[in-house]
Image: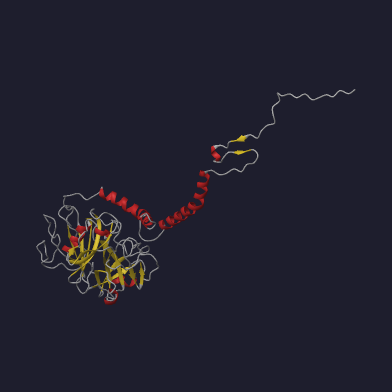
Amino acid sequence: MFTVVRPRIDHALPLAPQPERIALTSTSHRRVADQAGQRVRPGAVTLFLRWFALLCVPAIVASATSFVSAMDGSGNLTPVERSVEWLRGHHFGNVVSWVETQYYARHQPPTGGTLTGGLPEAATNEPTPSSPATGPASVDSIDPAATQPVAGEGVWQAYGDTSGGSTGMQVAYLRPDAVHGSVLAGVVRIDQQRTLLRLVPGSQEPGHGPWPAGNSVAAGDRPDLLAAFNSGFRVGDARGGFEEGGRTVGTLRTGAASLLIRPDGTADVVAWTSDLTTTQQPVAVRQNLDLIVDNGVPVDGLADNAGNRWGRTVGNRLFVWRSGVGIDASGRLIYVASSGLSVTTLALLLQRAGAVRAMELDINQSWVSFNVFHHDSSGIHGDKLLAAMAKPASRYLSADARDFFAVVARQPLDAPPSG
């Protein structure tokens, strides 16, 4: 007989192993998966990083490329100025304006004080008259605001090179208000019967170049060049347009403060209306915000920037570098600049200088610039209206980033004096 041997069943043996679940480490940012090959899904952080790389990295690379290109551009700008211009051109203008406002609010000109070194000497080759005006009582002067004016303060003096024995410009130096006794303003009066005005585009402003007029004083104007001065805000911030040589950037806004140049080279400062295109036939127009003087008086609402008519840059009440231009009752242009002006004191100074209509030009020490030019056998040389102006006296003789105005004598300049 056969004996059937049954296998012994040992219940102590372990059961067949079950699939073990493995928790992935946090560094993988994945969900729990099993050894059987369950699909691993990416976590929220991984998805964010993937979308960031897909959408943001190209934009960052493009911005970096644009910034590097801006740092290498032309136009007489420092690295800091190039950076600020790049930020304003890439939707960071409000941030830049906020930073500037905070800085200027903490660095206002001191109250009181006196002029260091007295009044500057006017740069001219016009012969000094035998009986020059020597005090504020002169008929042809600007009433000084200072309670104790110095000799010659506010008195008009010949300025620049001559044509036919006299120059087409005059200058006066004075304190702009009675509070800031150490602040000096320069005021230039330009006789349009003896001069022509040009609007010259810059390499960056108004953009959309190249422009036939170039980015510096034209070669044909240099032999009779008298002066050059800054224009207005960047076109994107000016609340208006720019027109020169039949081309327009931005939009010529009705009501905007506008310096227009007619075909004969004379200029006017007006509130823009569409009929001016027909009646004045301007060959150039530069708009900037709204008028600050009209009908011979400062307009209402300047200090509080009523209706946001005077931009969103540095606060209108702050005393900073500002410039402006106006037209007087005789058709002469009036240019004003100082390191310590609010919009209101700028308007008042233009009014005191005789302007019946006036507009603000640019602000900030980097941009406010007026240079008078002199000619001799060695070439053209510049002098600043105010020594504290940041840009060199040769500005505008080489390519400049910003558009500007050039003042040219209508008749050939006299030969420079010997010696």
Q: Position of residue 330 (x, y in %)?
A: 17, 72
In the shown orientation, is residue 382 left or right of residue 87?
Answer: left
Q: Position of residue 151 (x, y in %)?
A: 12, 58
| Quarter of the image where one finds residue 334 | bottom left
Q: Is residue 26 above or below residue 406?
A: above
In the shown orientation, is residue 272 left or right of residue 23?
Answer: left
Residue closer to the observer: 204 or 306: 306
Residue visible at 17% across and 68% down in the picture: 127
| Quarter of the image where one finds residue 399 | bottom left
Q: Quadrant of the C terminus?
A: bottom left
Q: Position of residue 337 (x, y in %)?
A: 23, 60
Q: Position of residue 278 (x, y in %)?
A: 29, 77
* Furthest-front residue in this view: 1
Residue closer to the observer: 361 or 287: 287
Q: Is residue 378 visible?
A: no
Residue closer to the observer: 11 or 168: 11
Indicate the colouring scheme: secondary structure
Q: Quadrant of the N terminus?
A: top right
